[in-house]
Amino acid sequence: MYAQMIKTASDGIKSRDEMSDEERTFQDKIDADIKIEPKDWMPEDYRRTLIRQIGQHAHSEVVGQLPEGNWITRAPTLERKAILLAKVQDEAGHGLYLYSAAETLGVSRDELVEMLLSGKMKYSSIFNYPTLNWADIGAVGWLVDGAAIINQVALQRTSYGPYSRAMIRICKEESFHARQGYHAIMAMAFGTPEQKKMAQDAVNRLWFPALMMFGPSDKDSVHSEQSMAWKIKIKTNDELRQQFVDQTVPQILYLGLDLPDPNIQWNEERGHYDFSDPDWSEFFNVIKGNGPCNTDRLAARRKAWDDGQWVRDGLLAHSRKKAAARMAAE
Amino acid sequence: MTRDDAFLQFLLRMGDNTLVLGHRVSEWCGHAPVLEEDIALANTALDLIGQTQMWLALAGEVQGDGKSADDLAFLRDAWDFRNALLVEVPNGDFGRTLMRQFLFDSWHKLMLERLKGSSDERVAAIAEKAVKEVTYHVERSRDTVIGLGDGTEESHARMQEALDYLWPYVGELFASDAVDAEMVAAGIAPDPASLRADYDAILTEVMAEATLSIPKSGFAHKGGRDGRMHTEHLGHLLTSMQWLQRAYPGARW
Ligand SMILES: [Fe+2]
Ligand SMILES: [Fe+2]
Ligand SMILES: [Fe+2]
């Protein structure tokens, strides 16, 4: 999802016999759905896996500002501009909650940002695709936030307390994101022929990248098993992807748009839609840095960070001076 | 000039200020020095666009030819814009953006406080709502100007440079003309010149705390409020802002 292909530090799950007493107590808590809190004992691998997952999720919220920000200055009405601003402001706020949740695991926000900028940590592959016409903004809210919601609703039950609480808070705001996106694209799908063309173009381009958000298929997802046992992950990639397809296909049909995949078909027996796999070689390429926007996105974040250095330094220097003055006065 | 003509001009001045500044601030989205600033800038832009919707909707109403706030925002050319030049200058670095914000916010708050007592209750109602948001904007821009002015050597130099660059655009906010005289006579809005003393007092105090010097020159660029001569920058801003409405006339979004 916003966190894809999270490596667990070790492979294979330990059996109860192989576990130490601490590990057994820890696993018992998880099995009993008792949340793990920052001060509780936790396996080092659990901590590291969570830092990767929450960090990647936080980075995704932050980098995710860029494709939508790309259209803020060109929003076609004051109302749409205001809605988009409110949404992007929320996403930055999600980044903040998530960095705070990660900090409870003993890593600072600055360290995480440093790892993003140096390429050591990733963000969701979806944000390496461009937003090329105004309908993309609708499609991002509807499909990308829609996919994120499916994952995040599941993650409300995740075993780590601060992460679970961040997800609960975030999910409250996410439904507005998906709704505004669907309304924006609806206005276009039911609008002029040119607008409908934009809507179709957006769905065609963003459909498979949205499916990729859930990560590789279960059979190729090497790190899932331990994460499921630790309840860092709640549902498998394929389960979540199917849920997304089942929810979204009727919406595409309602909009009167062509389905973006000729193999989408209701399967009576399974009670689900069948659909084509995304091109996984493309996915792995994007993850490796070869997506259409990887270089530009990272460059934009680096520039923001570097250009902002004097601002952060200046504000810090000022607050130190003030603190020193207060001390002297006491 | 009839009273309604003057009233329309006044409303466009208010609404175009918030529209153009809101647009400028929104250009920062995703590029701020720190995540908290991304949030604060988006929030400021959002408030300004919300205020634009109110001012321009009222302008359309007063104009009486069925134009919506969107028609006014997206379908006028540069010469019909009535914002002060200050808000259309490019963002520059973060320091200039926040300095411009402070210079504008300080004026904006004084203006809105007075407009709360407007004889036109629609104006008073907009001011009442907007002043709450602007009180927060000015607190924040003031703190940032002080923090960066009295920060490091580099941040101080950048803030002084920003103030020097923007200073010639401040005077226009307080220039009075026939439109203002008509608004004063109708009890709708104050004479902008009457806000200057309070403004100068605020600036003197804040710049002293920021260890910045207010330029001595009293020279003021003008031409935005009356549309006589905008900067070259406004046309570029409108090019992106109005693109979709211009390229697909009549479409509903
Ligand atoms: Fe989000
Ligand atoms: Fe969202
Ligand atoms: Fe606000």
Image (cartoon, rainbow, N blue to C red):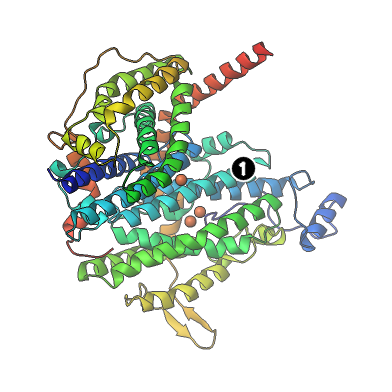
Element at badge 1? helix
Residue A269 versus residue A244 in the image, above or below = below
Which chain is mark 1 on?
A
Quarter of image, res A151: bottom right
Residue flagged by tag 1: what amino acid is it?
A: Ser
Quarter of image, res B91: top left
| Residue A180 picture location, percent across and down | 41, 62
Apparent side of residue A6 relative to residue B234 in the rendered image (left or right): right
Quarter of the figure that contains the C terminus of chain A: top right
| Residue B135 picture location, percent across and down | 45, 37
User: Is residue A13 visible to us here?
Assistant: yes
Return the residue found at the far right: A21
Residue labelled with disc 1: A100
Residue situated in front as seen by the camera: A189 or A63: A189
Residue situated in front as seen by the camera: A314 or B19: B19
User: Is residue A118 visible to us here?
Assistant: no
Residue B186 versus residue A14 in the image, above or below = above
Residue A94 versus residue B94 in the image, above or below = below
| Residue A111 picture location, percent across and down | 58, 35
**Rendered residue at 43%/31% (across/down):** B141
Return the residue found at the far bottom: A268
Apparent side of residue A305 relative to residue A201 in the rendered image (left or right): right
